[in-house]
Image (cartoon, helix red, strand yellow):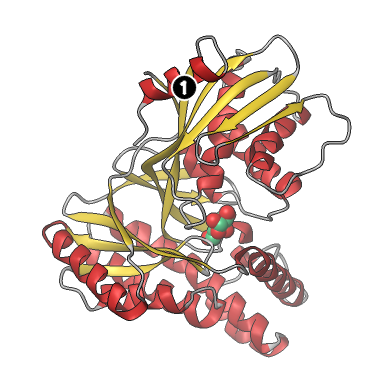
């Protein structure tokens, strides 16, 4: 947790003047992985861990940014006619300012100091927290009324078009719309959503494998291509199929012979995962946490075997969880190839669970995992020091 007063003090020292404070959360996805860019369903929750921004307007058109995390600063001209990415964290910030500008928002020059406690590169969406906190700050400083849906879309566009990562809408959307003690069921086609309360008798526990394999970004874009190939082949025989969201298991099985084996497995993950998300949201709403947990386990197997986005370390964490007392379900969360798992654990079993995971994972890998019990928090907001 950041100390807001310390951030304000640091801003005064580094830039001078009085900043306003904003925060946007990281997220954990309970179920629905790689479904967002297939127009499907996801069920994430916002974390208490967040990116904080202290910001104040400038009199010119420069965006001056400093990160306490990276200990680096940068300065950009908002009117640069040919902005080029630097391939580091500043691209997220600059990309958001550019996209808001492209969409006609009145973004002006600003001094921005950034601090974060969302672990970077761990599948908890530190990048969306950064984009959304900065985007919200720039709009608020310009006196613009923040439309959260548009902000989420502009941040996704920044990542797609400026950073070069073809992510879906899940991370930016939950960073904008999260609510304390709730998960959020999102239809990524219509962007309609429903908050689902998390049963008080369970805890959402995140275990960080502390590994991130380098192929994560390139493999992500390859998975998207396979999905697009599946849609092209299935769309030729199933009228009205615009995305894998429009395919059900029966349709996929009927036309399985049309797809190369790899494409079939990729599509099977997405199609089955979409069905699981909807069943899981209904189960959570009804307090059927056992059923929810079984769906999480099935989701992990599907990601591991069909979508092939897990890795050895993550499978070890998940299997340790599956063997622990009081664990209802466990799976990898986020884009894949490392990062974190999410487990649903009976409230009374959390402590023993954490201890068992740490011991088992250290023994198997020599690495010490981080374990967080999370209480879902709110979406992006103005903060006070
Ligand atoms: C990353 C992307 C999201 C989503 C997940 C996988 O977090 O940013 O849009 O695709 O991976 O579910």
Instruction: Give the total number of marks visible in the rendering.
Output: 1
Q: Looking at the picture, how far across and down is residue 30, in whole percent? A: 39, 58
CB of mark 1 near ligand 1 (< 8 Å) = no
Q: Looking at the picture, how far across and down is residue 211, in whole percent? A: 47, 66
Residue nearest the observer in this picture, 72 or 155: 72
Q: Residue at x 38, y 42 (%)?
A: 49
Q: Quadrant of residue 256?
A: bottom right
Q: Residue at x 50, y 50 (%)?
A: 125
Screen quadrant of the N terminus: top left
**Disc 1 crowd, CA 10 A, few/some/many (<14, 14-19, 20+):** some
Q: Is residue 31 above or below residue 135?
A: below
Screen quadrant of the C terminus: top left
| Image-based side of 335 in relation to 323, left or right | right
Would residue 40 be seen by someone viewing this image from the given angle?
no
Question: Which residue was labeled with disc 1?
Answer: 10
| Image-based side of 17 in relation to 331, left or right | right
Q: Quadrant of residue 37?
A: bottom right
Residue nearest the observer in this picture, 79 or 170: 79
Q: Residue furthest left?
A: 348
| Image-based side of 36 in relation to 366, left or right | right
Would residue 33 be seen by someone viewing this image from the given angle?
yes
Q: Secondary structure at mark 1?
A: helix
Residue nearest the observer in this picture, 366 or 157: 366
Quarter of the render that holds ligand 1: bottom right
Q: Looking at the picture, how far across and down is residue 83, in whole percent? A: 82, 36
């Amino acid at each position: 947790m950041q100390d807001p007063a310390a951030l304000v003090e640091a801003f005064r020292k580094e830039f001078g003047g009085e900043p306003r404070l904003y925060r946007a959360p990281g997220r954990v996805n309970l179920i629905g992985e790689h479904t967002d860019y297939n127009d499907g369903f996801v069920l994430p929750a916002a974390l208490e861990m967040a990116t904080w921004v202290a910001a104040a307007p400038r009199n010119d058109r420069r965006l001056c940014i400093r990160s306490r995390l990276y200990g680096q600063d940068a300065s950009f001209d908002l009117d640069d006619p040919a902005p080029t990415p630097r391939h580091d964290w500043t691209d997220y910030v600059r990309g958001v300012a550019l996209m808001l500008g492209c969409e006609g928002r009145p973004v002006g020059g600003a001094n921005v100091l950034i601090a974060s406690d969302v672990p970077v590169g761990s599948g908890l969406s530190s990048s969306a927290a950064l984009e959304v906190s900065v985007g919200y700050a720039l709009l608020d400083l310009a006196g613009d009324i923040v439309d959260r849906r548009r902000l989420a879309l502009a941040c996704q566009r920044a990542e797609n078009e400026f950073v070069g990562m073809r992510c879906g809408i899940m991370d930016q959307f939950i960073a904008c719309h999260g609510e304390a003690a709730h998960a959020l069921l999102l239809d990524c086609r219509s962007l309609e959503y429903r908050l689902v309360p998390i049963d008080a008798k369970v805890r959402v526990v995140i275990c960080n494998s502390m590994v991130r394999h380098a192929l994560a970004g390139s493999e992500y874009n390859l998975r998207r291509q396979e999905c697009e190939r599946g849609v092209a082949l299935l769309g030729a025989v199933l009228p009205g199929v615009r995305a894998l969201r429009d395919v059900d298991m029966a349709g996929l099985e009927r036309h399985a012979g049309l797809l190369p084996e790899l494409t079939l497995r990729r599509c099977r993950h997405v199609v089955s995962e979409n069905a699981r998300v909807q069943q899981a949201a209904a189960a959570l709403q009804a307090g059927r946490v056992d059923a929810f947990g079984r769906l999480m386990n099935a989701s992990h197997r599907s990601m591991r075997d069909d979508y092939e986005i897990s890795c050895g370390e993550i499978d070890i964490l998940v299997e340790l969880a599956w063997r622990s007392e009081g664990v209802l379900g466990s799976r990898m969360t986020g884009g894949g190839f490392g990062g974190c798992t999410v487990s649903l654990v009976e409230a009374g079993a959390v402590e023993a669970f954490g201890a068992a995971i740490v011991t088992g994972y250290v023994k198997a890998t020599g690495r010490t995992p981080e374990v967080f019990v999370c209480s879902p928090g709110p979406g992006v907001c103005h903060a006070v020091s």
